[in-house]
Amino acid sequence: MQLTRAGFLVLLWLFVLAALRVVRSDLYAASGLRVSVPGFRRNSKKSAGGSKAPRQLVVTHGALTGTRISLDGRPILIGRADDSTLVLDDDFASTRHARLSMRGTDWYVEDLGSTNGTYLDRAKVTAPLRVPLGTPIRIGKTVIELRS
Amino acid sequence: MGSPIPVGEGTPVAQAATSTSPGLKPPTKRGTELVMLAFAAGLVTLALILVELNQERAVTMRIVYLGLAYLALFSLAHLAVRRWAPYADPAILPCVALLNGLGLVMIHRIDLAQEDYAAKWDPVAFKQVIWTAIALAMFAAVLKFLTDHRTLARYGYTFGLLGLVALLLPGVLPSFIAPTINGAKIWLRVGPLSIQPGEFAKILLMVFFAAFLVSKRDLFTAAGRRVVGMDLPRARDLGPLLAAWGVSVGVMVLQKDLGSSLLFFGIVLVLLYVATERAAWVVLGIGLFSGGAVIAWKLFSHVQIRVQNWLDPFADYNDTGFQIAQSLFALGTGGIGGAGLGAGRPEMIPESNTDFITAVIGEELGFVGFAALLLIYMIFALRGLRSAIAVRDSFGKLLGGGLAFAVCFQVFIIVGGVTKLIPMTGITAPFLSAGGSSLLANYILVALLLRISDAARGPKVVAKPKLPQPAIADQHTVMVERPK
């Protein structure tokens, strides 16, 4: 009798642990915005000058502050359109506002004909510009930057 | 999901990039879900066997069939998820299945206990099984017909109105259609059915508030005066909060339903906080609610009784304090390891299969089992919040966060009441308590959460209107006036 009582409780806790295991295996897996795993190097190449290659895009100002998107070499679309990588809820952003894309080891920002323009630091982006690490890119009320 | 993609020359893939995984499809984890469901079904069957054994009833193959039927029922739900929300979170459904299954076993167990004592024996377990089946059908229907949670945002105001009507309807209708049961006027009686519209109002109002806050977010972040390190909102933006406060006080007064009132107001506050990230709203809201509660305590006797029983349930043990006192005795009898399934005395606890079902579980499974149960609720809420973080649209974030919080908060209110942490308020324990409306509403809630987590974890659908749309879409943005 005592055995079945304890046995059921053990099984109940095993279920909890199993559920937590599922949760844990999901922690680093694809779920929208990924946590960057320390010590997990994705880019083997380093850009010239010894600086690290950017590995994530961080929103530093605006409604989405704190959002991080890990960079995997694919271009990043920014705008109000639902299919953008970073969907902005911003009256000053266009439907397709800007694109960040990778050429070689560097990331370039280009404006996709937005109404209010895209600014790299203080300069308006008219042609694709190289984005250094930590330089703010302003799109409407949102500011993003690349970090390693 | 760890395979790194070689970063070569710039690959100018001009299609919508997935923000999630590099190239590969994210794992659906449906297999994990099925295994966990089978585990849950096994546990529930075992629980039923233990109950039957401890009640000295014959253990026949019937129990195994019941267990298999239960597994089949949830396998159907699993298939619905596999079909219509393939990337949904794998931990949510098994947690719900286990909670619901344990609830069914406990309700059956309470039926057995009452068989000997009640004058008119009315088994509830069978009804609850039927309700579970109906709720799972509803769950599948929501998954099938709601292909994108963002469509809900479009009907925000409609849902808001419906929710408000549903919340207040039992309070204002005459009592032959909305009877007062156990002091609360929250049921609608339609023929043989008793519906508790407040359970559905919870979800409807959450959809409304999420949609409303997404469209009006800027308004609420406009800074007002700064007081002790906090940006107070401007007075004129307080309207919605005051309205929510008025509604929740109205529910408290008209329907004498403290639990729903607290739940509703808590949800509004959390949604406001999530949308604006400003603690000032929460501080203001808690202040308002405390003020309202104190006034209600001064004015209404039923509130005074609740508070009195919370402070000292043994003062009036034979009358109003009886429920909580018995619940405390049950929890005390359970102790650390519990009395064992089927070996407790649930007939001693009033309202044992609805409001006080957690006390029955606390008695039979003890602190250890009760803690596991609360952890299962927590994992459920955790996965919901995680989906809300990962989903990329603001409406989904708000709705997902609100839904997950609602379940969590409801558990806090009822378990807090049963354990005398807060004044006892009659509210159902999600998925455990007997009651069709609660089960149905909570399964709809789970379906919405799975829909959101499917959107969060799944690969981004490549936008179809890619080719013809941009010209029109761009023209729309050109029409916006230039600020400079």
Image: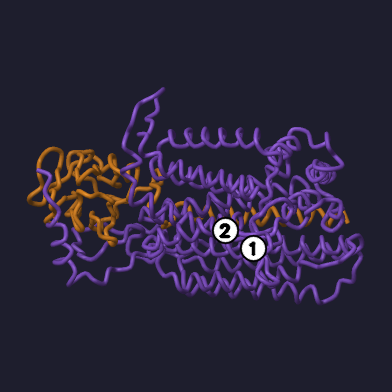
Chain colours: A orange, B purple
- According to the picture, the residue beneath numbered tag 1 turns out to be B188
Q: Position of residue B306 (x, y in %)?
A: 72, 40
- Residue placed at 41% from the left, 70% from the top? B147
Is residue A148 at least partly visible in the picture?
no
Q: Position of residue B300 (x, y in %)?
A: 67, 39
Tag 2, which chain?
A: B
- Specify the farthest residue to the left: A126
Give the structural element (helix, strand or loop) at label 2. Answer: helix
Cα–Cα gap, marks 2 and 1: 8 Å
In this orientation, which residue lies closer to the viewer: A70 or B142? B142
Q: Quadrant of residue B341?
A: bottom right
Q: Residue B52 got which mark?
A: none
Tag 1, which chain?
A: B
- Residue placed at 33% from the left, 60% from the top? B22
Q: Is residue B369 left or right of residue B401?
A: right
Tell whether label 1 touches label 2 (CB within 8 Å). yes
What is the quadrant of the N terminus of chain A in the image?
A: bottom right
Kind of residue indicated by mark 2: Leu
Which comes sooner in the sequence, label 2 or label 1?
2
Is residue B56 at least partly visible in the picture?
yes
Kind of residue indicated by mark 1: Leu
Q: How many marks?
A: 2
Local crowd size for mark 2, using a 10 Å CA cut-off: few (<14), some (14–19), many (≥20):
some
Q: Position of residue B55 (x, y in %)?
A: 89, 63
Both labels 2 and 1 in a single chain = yes
- Specify the farthest residue to the front: B174
- According to the picture, the residue beneath numbered tag 2 turns out to be B169
Q: Establish if B474 lies above or below B300.
A: below
In this orientation, which residue lies closer to the viewer: A104 or B277? B277
Local crowd size for mark 1, using a 10 Å CA cut-off: few (<14), some (14–19), many (≥20):
many
